[in-house]
Image (cartoon, rainbow, N blue to C red):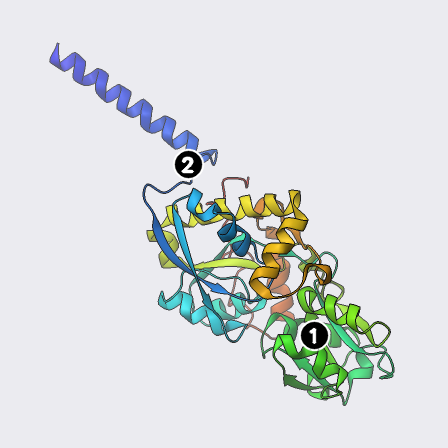
């Protein structure tokens, strides 16, 4: 009798394990953590889903307590903090620095796709009377970027390359993102790269004075599907998959909230950034935060083509991971 009962129990245990495995395979694992877990996230002045998730208690819903750490310099500067474990995640540096970091040996992986640049979320501007009409017009001119090697810098390089303008012909100057518009208006630089949270108020406050030279997605079509992504260190993903899964679930909820409540979302971003709602556009987000692997592969090609990373330093998709996002196939 004992032997039969034991076999029965073993059978039930096996069935339970198989059922659990099947649920995991279908991406239906409960993302809520068993207890409150604290992590740190890099913070950037942006229409960031993490701000929405924090304000609407979406992180708490999954037992996450997220502390925001201000990132002074955008770009690859934030990645060492993630690798070292000082913070666990961040997204304010766009795709290029992720690939540059991996090419340099930093083991970080993108797990959730944020904003897409379908309509040109990052744009190049010049003054209406500057005489600059295209990439060739930038030769011998100065151009404001937020930092070398950032998303805007790579987009500029791709824009210049289309018209066969060498990067050395353009004098790049670092300008803080909030100061870009004023730097252009005061003619400290001849052109600048701004994203929507800054170019929308710049356009509205200076109608007829500034004009668009190009959109990032014109220079890099892959940006229309993959523009920014949230990364975690590989070691952290391996040791804390549940935390990453919970973070992703909260971000999906935040994106859903933005899509359904754009005006309320603007008010949250205003609170976090100081940019008023009337000078703000609601960006588009990747569906369910799933990373487009075709666009991911295209980004590697862009980076290699423009010598931003060495050939062979990154495979097309080894730097992205959709497996912890239950909404992705």
Say the numbered circle drawn on residue 283: none
Q: Is residue 209 above or below residue 122?
A: below
> How many numbered discs sit on the rendered protein?
2
Quarter of the picture holding the N terminus: top left
The residue labelled by disc 1 is 193
Identify the mark nearer the N-term, 1 or 2.
2
For this orientation, the residue located farthest to the left is 2
In the displayed structure, does residue 230 sit left or right of residue 285? Answer: left
In the displayed structure, does residue 239 sit left or right of residue 145? Answer: left
Residue in view at x 38 percent, y 32 percent? 21
Q: Position of residue 12 (x, y in %)?
A: 28, 20
Q: Is residue 138 above or below residue 284?
A: below
Give the distance between the C-alpha atoms of the residues marked 1 and 2, in whole angstroms.
41 Å
The residue labelled by disc 2 is 30
Residue in view at x 67 percent, y 60 percent? 223
Secondary structure state at the residue bearing disc 1: strand
């Amino acid at each position: 009798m004992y032997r039969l009962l034991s076999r029965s129990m073993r059978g039930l245990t096996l069935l339970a394990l198989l059922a659990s495995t099947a649920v995991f395979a279908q991406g239906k694992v409960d993302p809520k953590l068993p207890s409150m877990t604290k992590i740190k996230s890099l913070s950037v002045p942006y229409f960031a889903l993490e701000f929405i998730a924090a304000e609407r208690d979406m992180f708490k819903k999954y037992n996450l307590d997220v502390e925001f750490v201000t990132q002074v310099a955008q770009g690859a500067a934030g990645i060492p903090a993630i690798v070292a474990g000082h913070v666990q995640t961040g997204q304010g540096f766009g795709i290029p620095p992720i690939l540059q970091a991996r090419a340099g040996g930093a083991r970080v992986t993108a797990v959730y796709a944020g904003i897409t640049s379908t309509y040109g979320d990052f744009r190049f501007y010049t003054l209406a009377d500057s005489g600059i009409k295209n990439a060739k017009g930038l030769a011998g001119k100065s151009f404001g970027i937020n930092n070398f090697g950032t998303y805007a810098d790579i987009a500029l390089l791709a824009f210049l390359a289309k018209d066969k303008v060498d990067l050395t012909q353009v004098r790049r100057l670092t300008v803080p993102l909030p100061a870009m518009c004023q730097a252009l208006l005061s003619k400290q630089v001849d052109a600048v790269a701004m994203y929507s949270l800054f170019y929308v108020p710049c356009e509205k406050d200076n109608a007829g004075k500034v004009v668009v030279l190009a959109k990032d997605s014109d220079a890099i079509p892959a940006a229309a599907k993959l523009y920014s992504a949230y990364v975690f260190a590989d070691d952290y993903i391996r040791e804390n998959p549940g935390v990453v899964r919970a973070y992703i679930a909260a971000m999906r909820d935040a994106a859903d909230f933005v899509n359904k409540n754009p005006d309320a979302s603007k008010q949250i971003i205003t609170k976090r950034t100081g940019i008023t709602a009337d000078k703000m556009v609601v960006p588009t987000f990747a569906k369910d935060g799933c990373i487009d692997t075709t666009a991911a592969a295209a980004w590697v090609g862009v980076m290699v083509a423009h010598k931003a990373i060495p050939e062979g330093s990154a495979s097309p998709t080894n730097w992205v991971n959709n497996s912890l996002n239950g909404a992705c196939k």
